[in-house]
Amino acid sequence: MGVEAIPAIDVPERVCPWWETRLFLALVVMATMVPLIYPGVPPLVDLFGHMGRYRVELDLRHSPFLQLYYDYHWAAIGNLGVDLLVIPLGRLIGLELAVKLIVLAIPPLTAGGFLWVAREVHGRIPPTAFFALPFIYGYPFLFGFVNFTLSGTRYAFTTADVRGGEPDLKLGSIPQ
């Protein structure tokens, strides 16, 4: 009348589909930058107004001409992400290149956030998740609301990072 041990069941390791491989995901995320690589300044409607503000922000102390017409006072308000990035980068590499690099980073960051959220929600990256990627170039981004879209990337990564109230900080969590 002994208790018999049941043999362990071999659970096969999940086979990773091609759309979940690191190489494919890296290529897709980097491909979101392609439309913005060629133009010297990204052709976003409101971006030129932002760039004018950034120029005043960077050069007001040194330009008597700008001091005649402008004054600049910092305030802690939302949507200052690009402004905070432009200050050090603009002084280091110039305003236009700094803005281009920051704007060039927004689509891949958003794509990475979308795909990470899909993986956290489904436990894998469903093939339908890629249908969301063209929306990166939707109304807010094309109209140049760069602070808003940059904050959206932060929201996507924060949403994906918090799972069950506990941060999931494992690097390399995407299967190879």
Image (cartoon, rainbow, N blue to C red):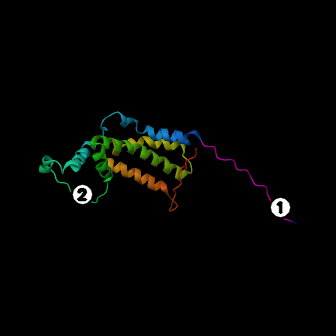
Residue at screen point 34% across, 50% down: 148
Answer whether residue 143 is visible to the viewer in this image.
no
Q: Look at mark 2 in the image and give the residue it sits on.
A: 74
User: Residue 62: image x %, image y %?
Assistant: 17, 49
Kind of residue indicated by mark 1: Glu
User: Residue 120: image x %, image y %?
Assistant: 53, 52
Return the residue nearer the eye: 11 or 175.
175
Q: Is residue 85 left or right of residue 158?
A: left
Question: What's drawn in magenta, residue-wise?
Answer: 2-16
Residue at screen point 36% across, 49% down: 150
Q: Is residue 23 left or right of residue 155?
A: right
Of tags 2 and 1, the one toward the viewer is: 2
Tell me if residue 126 comes above or below residue 4 in the rendering: above
The C terminus sits in image quarter: top right
Q: Look at mark 1 in the image and give the residue it sits on.
A: 4
The N terminus sits in image quarter: bottom right
SS at badge 1? loop
Q: Taken as a whole, is the magenta stretch helix, strand or loop?
A: loop
Answer whether residue 36 is visible to the viewer in this image.
yes
User: Residue 71: image x %, image y %?
Assistant: 17, 54
Kind of residue indicated by mark 2: Trp
Return the residue nearer the eye: 118 or 13.
13
Q: Given the current orientation, which residue lies at the most extreme top position?
A: 38
Residue at screen point 16% across, 47% down: 63
Return the residue nearer the eye: 106 or 54.
54
How many labels, in total? Answer: 2
